[in-house]
Image (spheres, rainbow, N blue to C red):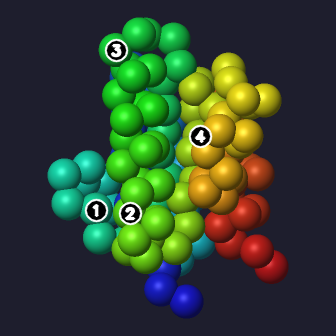
Amino acid sequence: MNRHIDILTLGCSKNLVDTEHLMGHLQALGWHCHHDPVTPTARVAVINTCGFIGDAKEESIRTILQFVERKNKGELEQLYVMGCLSQRYADELPKELPEVDGWFGKFDFDALLRRLTPT
């Protein structure tokens, strides 16, 4: 399996810290992490979202939709969304965007890591 992953961080500085924490765990598990929102190239992506600040919430939805489009075109195999938006709208988002392979709240690092590195 290609172990490259794009990770995008949206919203507050806490999300950046969470992303760095996630990247450290993924790299320890053999993943090559890319943190470049402009030129994503990996077949797997994680978007760390904001769900409280209006502009960041809109940016999160817009970014998810862009990656869903990439997935629909066959440019992306797996798409995961984590963070505040996922947690705050846990009931609605999976119904609205079934193309996303997994939704994880802001404290669900372990569940996301298990999904990305099944034993």
Between residue 41 and residue 118, name the one nearer to us.
Answer: 41
- Using the image, determine if residue 111 lies above or below residue 42: above
Give the residue number, with chain letter if any, for mark 3: 55
Q: Do the residues labelled 4 and 3 touch (CB within 8 Å)?
A: no
Distance between the Cα atoms at labels 4 and 3? 17 Å
Q: Earlier in the sequence, mark 1 or mark 4?
A: 1
The reply, left or right, for residue 6 in relation to residue 51 is left
Q: Position of residue 36 (x, y in %)?
A: 24, 54
Give the residue number, with chain letter if any, for mark 1: 40
Residue 56 visible? The answer is: yes
Label 1 residue SS: loop
Distance between the Cα atoms at labels 2 and 1? 10 Å
The reply, left or right, for residue 91 in relation to residue 81 is right
Distance between the Cα atoms at labels 1 and 4? 17 Å
Q: Are marks 2 and 1 in contact (CB under 8 Å)?
A: yes
Q: Do the residues labelled 1 and 4 touch (CB within 8 Å)?
A: no
Q: Earlier in the sequence, mark 3 or mark 2?
A: 3
